[in-house]
Image (spheres, grey):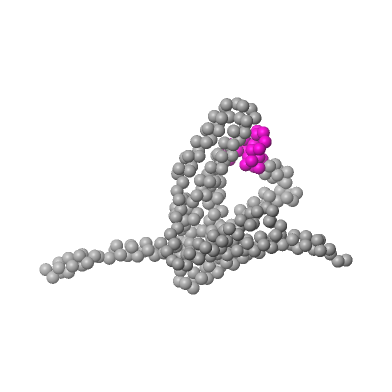
Amino acid sequence: MRMSADLRDLFLYEVFLYYNPLFLVALMIWLWGVNLWVFAQSSVNYVKVFDLAQTHLSHREIWRVLLYAILLIVLLSPFDMFYLSSRFYFLRTMLRIILPLQAITFPDFFLADIFTSMSKVFSDLERSVCRMVNRQVATIAWFEADSICGSHSIAIPLVLVLPYLCRFFQCLRQYKDTKEKSCLLNALKYSTAFPVIFLSALKYHVFPDQWVYYWVLGSNLILRCTWTYKLSAHLRHNYLTVFAITALEMLRRFQWVFFRVENEWNKMTAKQNFEMSSDMPSESDRLLESNSHTV
């Protein structure tokens, strides 16, 4: 019995859907291995850049970062296991918190209030995921405020403000439904967190200083624009094109790794050179020392 063309296309799409994420993850890890090989060939001491000990994470141990992905997959799994009804109840409540388009129920504001107390937890979670995605696990960049996953990242205030923003809109929605002025007072209370969070945020700067960086700027801009193709819902049925753009995004990140590590290496060597020059005696000191010997 021959398979119809539509059924064959559906089957191929299903196979592609299940296996292409695994391929892309493997591709990203392979590209990271290429990064490390190039650093070794170029005498870039990436172990020192990342401040890695002799027992630093190996390419095998790095798979432990998949714990976050596994937890997310379990939470979103549509299969009837791991308490499907409870997980979906939690997800539905989360959706109502993010989009308060209906009357606010007790579980909605109850969970949202808990989330406001966990804003720092969400921020730390974002930092952890950022370091995993940008391969900054067990590196000195953890202590540097200006690193891409450092304490000056713009993502931190955005994540911190989300629970308060959701609760703020919930209060406005409650006022719309009940006309109780206490809801406006609650909204004002939660809005006081906004200036505190954003006024304390700082900006991350990058200063390119070689012609090759212009290529990075151009290719980065083009690839970022093509990445929006994947985010367009009405275009997602072109899964081969989306796959290609996803792979290009990984290549863009692969390209980014070189310049991020190079920048860190240049900063470290510049600091070492400054310390060495400050330890060397000046010309006047050498003259005074020679005069004292002649006397």
Q: What residue is at 48 percent from the left and 43 percent from the top?
A: 198
94 inside magenta stretch: yes
Q: Please state if 167 lies on the left or on the right of 206 as rendered.
A: right
Q: Position of residue 254 (x, y in %)?
A: 55, 64
Q: What residue is at 53 percent from the left and 67 percent from the top?
A: 35
Q: Quadrant of residue 275?
A: bottom left
114 inside magenta stretch: yes
Q: What residue is at 48 percent from the left and 62 percent from the top?
A: 260
Q: Please state if 118 lies on the left or on the right of 46 as rendered.
A: right
Q: Quadrant of residue 226?
A: bottom right
Q: Position of residue 16 (x, y in %)?
A: 72, 62
Q: Please state if 286 lies on the left or on the right of 249 as rendered.
A: left
Q: Position of residue 149 (x, y in %)?
A: 50, 54
Total residue callouts: 0
Q: Is residue 72 visible?
A: yes
Quadrant containing the N terminus is bottom right
Q: Quadrant of residue 269?
A: bottom left
Q: Which residues are magenta?
A: 93-116
- Relative to 28, residue 189 above or below: above
Quadrant containing the C terminus is bottom left
Residue positioned most to the right: 1
Q: Please state if 146 lies on the left or on the right of 169 as rendered.
A: left
Q: Position of residue 217 (x, y in %)?
A: 50, 62
Magenta stretch secondary structure, dominant: helix
**Of residues 248 and 107, which is closer to you in this image?**
248
